[in-house]
Image (tube, rainbow, N blue to C red):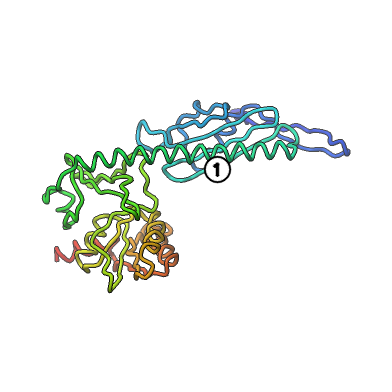
């Protein structure tokens, strides 16, 4: 029988001055304990050796992310009072904290650890803001270098849609992500085979790509996940469409556009992910509609999205 691996935490019994006993964990390997906590939070850290207890912001690669990227982050403190860590994953938004004391924490020590965690979070936000600004500068340069797209680009042909103001750089379609004020924050690339990639470090939350203009009299606005879906909706209805790029961004975009167009009738055009547990497309679309007092439109079965419907109608 193989021996169980030793845990980074071991127990000791400390006699309480009042006659009781306090079972308190002893920290024998802070790095391993923090790495375990990061993994328990659903962040597949790929470079545990980078975790160092120096109180500084550390970045690490996360399994499944682009090779060479370091979207994971952590801050680890280790001193006489105990160990405290904050960590997260910029790409997914997952984050967490972990702490363990050496004996009993005083209230002053707990306050110091809370401040250390808050400082780590401020460092994280500052780093993310800097990365977003740097990505925005790159996006502006890339957008200026891009040209009118080839109407025969395989993706446009396959999806049977028009470009609607997007551009092309080499063989990639380039779609801008802008905020409500029109600032360009990032771009999405769509390759010839349909593979999609976002600009590293770029802001996505609350940003969108507009197709058409909101009619001041009708005040109707649709929000969809992908560019092809949004293009098909606009071409079929003539209504203004905002492309949110994924299900998780539907609600942030809906809230942004509700603030910009308080009287608009907003319809969230859901992807019907019926074969995916929880149907995230429909679930997120419904939540977004409820958040802004809007409506939900669902493509008819067996289609996943409204571009599928449009393509099928053209073929038929």
Q: In this view, does 101 lie above or below 91?
A: above
Q: In this view, does 145 lie to the left or right of 77?
A: left
Q: Can residue 1 be seen in this view?
A: no
Name the quadrant containing residue 266: bottom left
Q: Position of residue 256 (x, y in %)?
A: 39, 59
Quarter of the image with the C terminus in it: bottom left
Out of 35 and 233, give the one closest to the viewer: 233
Q: In this view, does 277 lie to the left or right of 198?
A: right
Out of 77 and 282, give the one closest to the viewer: 77
Quarter of the image with the N terminus in it: top right
Name the quadrant containing residue 279: bottom left
Name the quadrant containing residue 86: top right
Residue at the spot x=48%, y=45% of the render?
94
Residue at the spot x=30%, y=70% of the render?
219
What is the secondary structure assignment of the residue under circle 1? strand
Residue annotated with mark 1: 96
Q: Position of residue 299 (x, y in %)?
A: 29, 66
Residue at the spot x=17%, y=57% of the render?
161
| Outermost bottom residue | 217
Q: Count the numbered circles shown.
A: 1
Q: Where is residue 242 in the image (x, y as percent from the top left)?
A: 30, 59
Q: In this view, does 8 lie to the left or right of 278?
A: right
Residue at the spot x=44%, y=41% of the render?
90
Q: Can residue 95 be seen in this view?
A: yes
Out of 265 and 77, give the one closest to the viewer: 265
Q: In this view, does 296 lie above or below 148?
A: below
Q: In this view, does 117 lie to the left or right of 273?
A: right
Q: Where is residue 104 in the image (x, y as percent from the top left)?
A: 75, 36
* Mark 1 crowdedness (10 Å alpha carbons): few <14, some 14-19, many ≥20: some
């Amino acid at each position: 029988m193989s021996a169980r691996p030793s845990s980074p935490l071991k127990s000791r019994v400390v006699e309480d001055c009042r006659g009781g006993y306090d079972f308190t964990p002893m920290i024998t390997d802070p790095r391993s304990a923090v790495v375990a906590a990061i993994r328990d939070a659903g962040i597949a850290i790929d470079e545990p050796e980078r975790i160092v207890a120096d109180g500084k912001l550390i970045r690490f690669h996360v399994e499944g992310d682009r090779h060479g990227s370091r979207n994971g982050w952590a801050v680890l403190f280790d001193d006489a009072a105990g160990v405290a860590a904050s960590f997260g994953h910029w790409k997914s938004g997952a984050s967490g904290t972990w702490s363990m004391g050496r004996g009993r924490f005083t209230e002053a020590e707990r306050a110091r650890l809370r401040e250390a965690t808050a400082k780590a979070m401020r460092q994280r936000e500052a780093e993310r803001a800097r990365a977003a600004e740097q990505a925005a500068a790159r996006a502006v340069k890339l957008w200026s270098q891009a040209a009118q797209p080839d109407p025969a680009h395989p993706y446009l042909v396959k999806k049977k849609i028009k470009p609607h103001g997007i551009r092309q750089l080499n063989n990639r379609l380039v779609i801008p992500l802008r905020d409500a004020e029109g600032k360009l924050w990032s771009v999405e690339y769509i390759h010839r085979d349909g593979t999609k990639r976002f600009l590293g470090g770029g802001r996505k939350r609350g940003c969108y790509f507009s197709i058409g203009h909101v009619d001041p009299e009708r005040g109707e606005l649709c929000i969809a996940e992908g560019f092809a879906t949004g293009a098909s909706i606009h071409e079929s209805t003539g209504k203004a469409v905002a492309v949110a790029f994924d299900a998780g961004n539907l609600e942030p975009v809906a809230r942004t556009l509700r603030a910009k167009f308080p009287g608009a009738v907003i319809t969230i055009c859901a992807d019907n992910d019926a074969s995916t547990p929880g149907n995230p497309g429909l679930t997120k679309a419904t939540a977004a509609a409820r958040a802004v007092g809007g409506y939900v439109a669902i493509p008819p079965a067996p289609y996943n999205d409204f571009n599928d419907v449009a393509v099928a109608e053209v073929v038929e």
